[in-house]
Amino acid sequence: MSNQPSETPNNGFGGAETIVNEQGWLERAPIPGSEAIKIALENSINLCGLNKSQIELILKGEFIDQETLNSRGVATKRIIIEYDVKENASSLEV
């Protein structure tokens, strides 16, 4: 019964994909880390102490989920945000 996709269309999760957890309750299915960070940034745009234009610039960037494995066998997950990318004119010459 754990982590089974739900077929219930109107379940109060705003159309998000859901799963049935180990206790039999519906919960929102996990989303990629980069998507979670993007949602958090969208929700924080108008918070005091943050530069709204900087957050908007970051949100226009590319959010990348990456899994790595190093030579010692350590696996990690990374979230990379590439934003405000500027190309040097001299690097465009071929």
Image: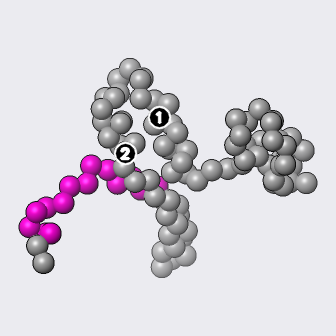
Q: Provide the secondary structure element on which disc 1 rests.
A: helix
Residue in front for this viewpoint, 63 or 93: 93
Residue 91 pos. (x, y %): 13, 69
Residue 5 pos. (x, y %): 81, 53
Q: Which mark is residue 42?
A: 1
Image-based side of 48 in relation to 91, left or right: right
Q: Which quadrant is home to the C terminus? A: bottom left
The residue to which callout 2 is attached is 60
Q: CA distance from mark 2 to mark 1?
A: 11 Å
| 2 or 1: tag closer to the N-terminus | 1
Using a 10 Å C-alpha cutoff, classify the residue at mark 2 as few (fewer than 14 neighbours), some (14 to 19) or many (20 or more).
few
Q: Which quadrant is home to the N terminus? A: bottom right
The quadrant in which residue 2 appears is bottom right
Residue 56 pos. (x, y %): 35, 36
Which residues make up the magenta segment? 79-92
Which amino acid, mark 2? Lys
Q: Is residue 80 magenta?
A: yes
Which amino acid, mark 1? Glu
Give the farthest residue toward the front.
9
Residue 63 pos. (x, y %): 44, 53
Give the answer, above or below, for where 59 lies relative to 32.
above
Q: Which mark is residue 68?
A: none
Residue in front for this viewpoint, 94 or 21: 94
